[in-house]
Amino acid sequence: MLSLGALFGAIALAAHVARDQLDALGRAFVDRFGLAGMFLGTYLADAFSFPIPPQFYMLTAISSGGPQVAPMVVISVASLLAGSTGYLLAGHLARFRVLAARLERTRPRIDRLFARYGYWAIAIGSLTPVPFSMLCYLSGLYRIPPRYFVTLVLFRVPRLLLFYALIRLGWSQ
């Protein structure tokens, strides 16, 4: 809750202090890069922990004053594909001997977590402030069964919609 409040507060403050500059940035980004730029940026952020998060692209869509549905669909699809990329890539990385040895030392804790909580472990993990890309990589590294990973991915869309709502609300302040 604290991180969500911080997001709202940061957007509200930015809207108050630099609305004209952010309007210009949003319009310029959307005019120059469009939906493809939002897709690529979100994909890089959620697949490879690129430093510009999907929330930036949501803000540019909102501040540009353009339609909102298409950008949110593009951002959501890119995020889901990126999460799957991270999961698959991490699964391959887990085969390297150096990494595999470290993972095997902590694997019993992960196995107990899923044995005890099952899908709730994923649901709770998806609500934490841990970045989605990190959750996907950890899922792949520990070879979490695909059924659990799909649950994590399905929780991503409501989380993105929540971020969007908070950004939109903060921007309207």
Image (spheres, grey):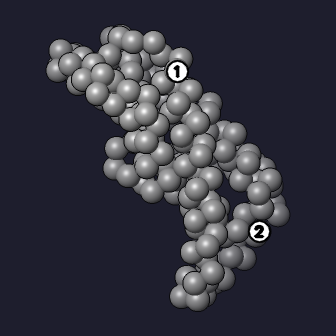
**Image location (x, y in percent) of residue 9:** 33, 26
- Quadrant of the image containing the C terminus: top left
Q: Is residue 165 above or below residue 100?
A: above
Q: Classify 10 Å Cα crowding around label 1: few (below 14), some (14-19), many (20 and above).
A: few
Q: Is residue 75 left or right of residue 65?
A: right
Residue 82 in picture, x, y percent from top left? 55, 49
Amino acid type, mark 1 = Ala
| Amino acid type indicated by mark 2 | Arg
Residue 104 coordinates in the image, percent (x, y): 66, 83
Q: Position of residue 60 (x, y in %)?
A: 34, 25
- How many marks the image carries: the answer is 2
For label 1, the residue is 70
The residue that mark 2 highlights is 112
- The tag earlier along the polypeptide, 1 or 2, is 1
The image's mark for residue 173 is: none
Q: Nearer the viewer, residue 42 or 130?
A: 42
Residue under the point 33% across and 31% down: 33
Residue 97 vertical position relative to residue 49 in the rendered view, above or below: below
